[in-house]
Amino acid sequence: MTPLMKYPFHFLLISVLLSVLPVAVEGKAVDAPAAAASLSAPRSVREQCLVYFEELYRTMDENYFFDIRRADYDRFIKSFDEKILPSLLLEGKSSDYVRWRSTAYLLDYLKQPDDVFSRFLPPVPAEKFAQEVYGQKIDLGVEGRMEAPGFVVNFIEPRSDAYALGLRENDLIVRLDGTEVLKLGEERARAALVPLAGARVQIDFIDAVARKPHIIAPVSKEYFKQTVFLRETGVPDVYCLDIQKFNRETNEDMSRFLPVIAAKKPRGLVIDLRNNPGGPPLAALMVSAFFLPNEELFAYFEGRHKPRSELVIPRLPDEFHYDWPLVILVNSGTGSASELFSGVMQARQRAIVVGRDTAGQVLLKSIFNMSDGSSVAMVVARGHFPDGRPFPFDGVKPNEYVPDDIPADKMIGNAAKYLLLKAEGRL
């Protein structure tokens, strides 16, 4: 049974989101055929660069959240002709390298000084960056450690092909592609579990439950990583979910844990968003549906030339709605979708936020494809609370400040104790 079949409300969630949210979370090609033809024509390196610079400028002018000025572009071209191009040509680099490197300089020159997200990426780094931004991986999704009998699986991604074929935590891998793992050694065994995309690896293992042998041949392919993990609090009846990043499947991860927690009649929940860099705003919206009233405005984004795009909380069945007291842990590494979520939950008095100021990056970001396979990652809109207030650039302010040097386990434990005292009416 697939996760979507197990949790049918996901279909409703997705259909609602598609109907209410026109904001793009991925970019588009910009006049790619024409620009590509111009680059492939027999031109000097300088002429190729100027064609490409115009493509970048047009992409930024049409989509970048902040203003860019043609006068700044003209000043850059002067510096390019006098300093940048001669220096790169002296290094003996290829025309592609010169074009990419100088285009990266141009983007840095045009963007806002405090914009840490927007950047230019040549083809190979662009593909890797897109996977990181959207929380995707390409491998077998298997982690473990070498012990005397073999390689013991200590974690497996639930959306990986190996998981779909039956491999689970604590299973014992004895052979990889016919070679005994003990002969491979731990380093080579780990490397064999991270093959190139599309590679198929035969895994002989003994399952941890029935102690029976199995042979599978999973494929190394793209999947969305698990982002939610259950952590110990040390406090009875209070639980903690550590959300390490937001991606398209974070709500599915939550839906695996929340019913289990609900069955234990919890007295509170800690959500740890410390050092969570965020992800697509849609992911934060979908997680909010577990805790906030249905079909109300969650937040909205508005760009310099883009119309307002609203995020409306989708409707979930009552059994998937939870009203436990919440504490959300944040710090300066809490950014983007994670501070969008924590800020809205705080503003609606649905959760107490504890920690340090967040990153101040509630901005909609998008990736735009260039004509040669390169990409431009760019801020395109700013987030606003439902009442119209923009999310501040200095971050979400916690209800309770806690120093950064407090150990992680102690911070979770203290938050859990607070929730228990509150549940017992002692606060």
Image (spheres, rainbow, N blue to C red):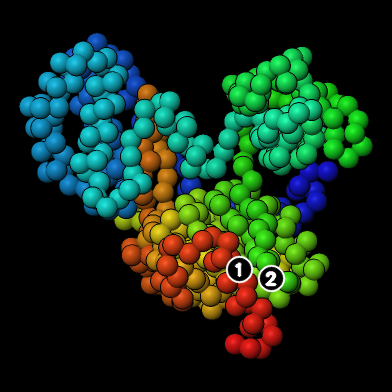
Is 246 placed left or right of 386 in the picture?
A: right
Q: Position of residue 344 (x, y in %)?
A: 50, 69
Q: Position of residue 364 (x, y in %)?
A: 42, 53
Q: Position of residue 262 (x, y in %)?
A: 77, 67
Is 386 placed left or right of 326 in the picture?
A: left
Q: Residue at x 68, y 33 (%)?
A: 145
Q: Earlier in the sequence, mark 1 or mark 2?
A: 2
Q: Nearer the viewer, residue 388 or 97?
A: 97
Q: Nearer the viewer, residue 158 or 373?
A: 158
Is 228 placed left or right of 331 in the picture?
A: right
Classed neighbour count for the residue bearing mark 1: other residues with Cα under 10 Å, few (<14), some (14–19), many (≥20)? many
Q: Quadrant of the C terminus?
A: bottom right
C-alpha separation, residue under disc 1 versus residue under disc 2? 7 Å
Assess whether mark 2 and mark 1 are in contact (beta carbons under 8 angstroms): yes
Q: Residue at x 36, y 32 (%)?
A: 121
Q: Amino acid at mark 1?
A: Gly
Which residue lies under the disc numbered 1?
Answer: 413
Residue 303 image-quadrant placement: bottom left
Q: Residue at x 10, y 38 (%)?
A: 75
Residue 412 image-quadrant placement: bottom right
Under circle 2, the secondary element is loop
Which residue lies under the disc numbered 2?
Answer: 235
Q: Amino acid at mark 2?
A: Val
Q: Position of residue 160 (x, y in %)?
A: 69, 35
